Amino acid sequence: MPHRERKNIRAGLKVAVVMKQDQRSGRETEGEVRDILTRSAFHPHGIKVRLSDGRVGRVIRILSGAD
């Protein structure tokens, strides 16, 4: 799964994330990656990122590349 590998995530990428408070419901939030917070090359639950609006969550889907 590409969203679990840090090398596939970069600033400017459009992604869908699940924020901590939405983990039980699985509610997705879409946004643009500003910062990558996960330091390891792989994470089984998705790479943690900060979106351009400041919200933080784990990437569950990559929507599109940087424009």
Image (spheres, rainbow, N blue to C red):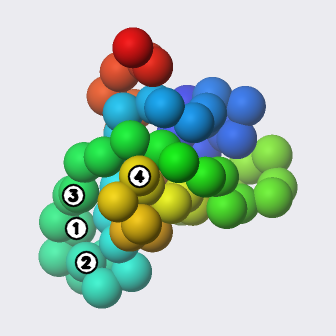
Q: Is residue 46 left or right of residue 43?
A: left
Labels 1 & 2 near each other (Cβ < 8 A): yes
The kind of residue on which mark 3 rests is Glu
| x 35%, y 21%: residue | 64
Image location (x, y in percent) of residue 26: 22, 67
> Real-space Cα distance between discs 3 and 1?
6 Å
Query: Which residue is most to the bottom?
Result: 21
What kind of element bears circle 3?
Answer: loop
Image location (x, y in percent) of residue 18: 33, 64
Give the labeled residue for mark 2: 22
Give the labeled residue for mark 4: 52
Q: Is residue 56 left or right of residue 2?
A: left
- Per the rendering, the mark at residue 7 is none
The 10 Å Cα crowd at callout 1, few under 14, some 14 to 19, many 20 or more, is few
Q: Is residue 22 left or right of residue 48?
A: left
Question: Is residue 60 visible to the viewer in this orientation of the structure?
Answer: no
The kind of residue on which mark 1 rests is Gly
Q: Earlier in the sequence, mark 2 or mark 3?
A: 2
Query: Which residue is most to the front?
Result: 53
Seen in the picture, residue 58 relative to 1 is either above or below; the reply is: below
Labels 2 & 3 near each other (Cβ < 8 A): yes
Give the labeled residue for mark 1: 26
| x 31%, y 28%: residue | 63
Labels 3 & 1 near each other (Cβ < 8 A): yes
- Per the rendering, the mark at residue 28 is 3
Q: Earlier in the sequence, mark 4 or mark 3?
A: 3
What kind of element bears circle 4?
Answer: loop
Quarter the C terminus occupies: top left
> Real-space Cα distance between discs 2 and 3?
8 Å
> Real-space Cα distance between discs 4 and 3?
16 Å
